[in-house]
Image: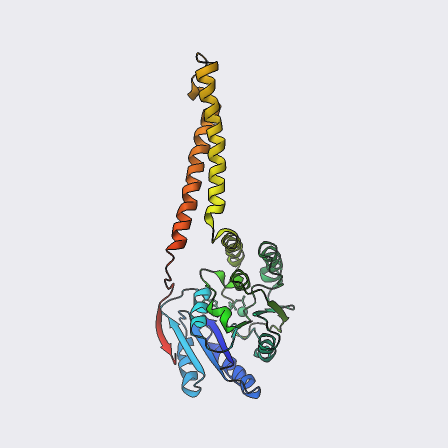
Amino acid sequence: MNISVVIPLLNEQESLQELHDWIAKVMQSNHFSYEIIFIDDGSTDQSWNTILKLSEKDANVKGIRFLKNFGKSQALHAGFEKAQGEVVITMDADLQDNPDEIPELYSMIVNDHYDLVSGWKKKRYDSVIAKNLPSKLFNWAARKTSGVKLNDFNCGLKAYNLKVVKNIDVNGEMHRYIPVLAKNAGFQNIGEKVVKHQARKYGHTKFGMERFINGFLDLITIWFISRFGRRPMHLFGALGVLMFIIGFAFALYLGIDKLFFNPLGRLITERPQFYIALSTMIIGSQFFVAGFLGELILRSKSNKKRYLIQTQLNL
Ligand SMILES: Nc1nc2c(ncn2[C@@H]2O[C@H](COP(=O)(O)OP(=O)(O)O)[C@@H](O)[C@H]2O)c(=O)[nH]1
Ligand SMILES: [Mg+2]
């Protein structure tokens, strides 16, 4: 199979038929063998019924329905797990991403050997204040911390070599940082393609300003995980030992001073150095233990699923 199109969605009933027809048209005119995997993430409208109807007419349509809303990252994870095409394309369900981009994206993966190609909505059709400005700031921060040189991390339209999606673990709200996850997993060949973006035709956006706050917090997490995720002891152990040594030096100084130089001076507990010694040694040991626990957790990592599927279609 050439292409798997993975489409996570939440309450997009009006768009699905049109989106399906458009994708099918592009696939057929390019003679691709393909599947479209819709992941209905607990929609409360008619989205799942629409997907059922589409699948009756078109055997390329597959579907996953979550028991409740688990989030876009979980939906992508489920789709990636099932995808079979040599190229996997993700796109939004709201018709803002243009299926006409698919052949070019496919070719960049297959012929130009990119591991991942991310869409770049150079000209956006969203509101300037709510999306465009914060998103510039957000992308700048993401570039700086991750070292992945993309202009538009958050674009839903992306193409992947199948082996990339099978080897990354998208969870939490990490769908914004899949290129960073891919890079951390060892896929260095990351490209970008300017894609056409449309204004939302039906429904309304599901992500508000809170995405930027969450986005930045996730960015810190991902930076941390990529630096120290595989070796927590290198950070916590070093910090812990350093602090402990500082504290111990103060304690030693107090002890020697008391025993040999000032036995009749102030009580040790009345001196500020005592409190510095006490707190740094305690915090230092805690850091050390945190690093050690991190290492233990790493070694017992279980592959637990983070979502529950209610129904599956053709999979
Ligand atoms: N699986 C899943 N998809 C979601 C969720 N929220 C939004 N989406 C989908 O993600 C895509 C982009 O969402 P949208 O609201 O258009 O965001 P915007 O284009 O950035 O304003 C659409 O296809 C939505 O249906 C969610 O909680 N779970
Ligand atoms: Mg949208």
Q: Is residue 189 above or below residue 297?
A: below
Q: Is residue 18 above or below residue 220?
A: below
Quadrant housing the C terminus: bottom left
Q: Front-most of 3 and 98?
A: 3
Question: Which x, y percent locates residue 143?
Answer: 61, 57
Query: Colour scheme in the image?
Result: rainbow
Q: Is residue 107 above or below residue 221?
A: below
**Which residue is found at the position 46% from the left and 46% from the top?**
233
Question: Which x, y percent locates residue 221?
Answer: 49, 53
User: In this rendering, would 214 be left or right of 145?
Assistant: left
Which quadrant does ligand 2 occupy? bottom right
The answer to which quarter of the image holds residue 142 is bottom right
Q: Front-most of 309 and 240?
A: 240
Q: Front-most of 196 and 167?
A: 167
Q: Is residue 192 above or below residue 259?
A: below
The answer to which quarter of the image holds residue 64 is bottom left
Q: Is residue 37 visible?
A: yes
The residue sitting at the top extreme is 264
Question: Which x, y percent locates residue 94?
Answer: 52, 73
User: In this rendering, would 312 be left or right of 182?
Assistant: left
User: In this rendering, would 259 be left or right of 119?
Assistant: left
Q: Is residue 271 visible?
A: no
Question: Which x, y percent locates residue 235?
Answer: 49, 45
**Which residue is found at the position 46% from the left and 22% from the top?**
254
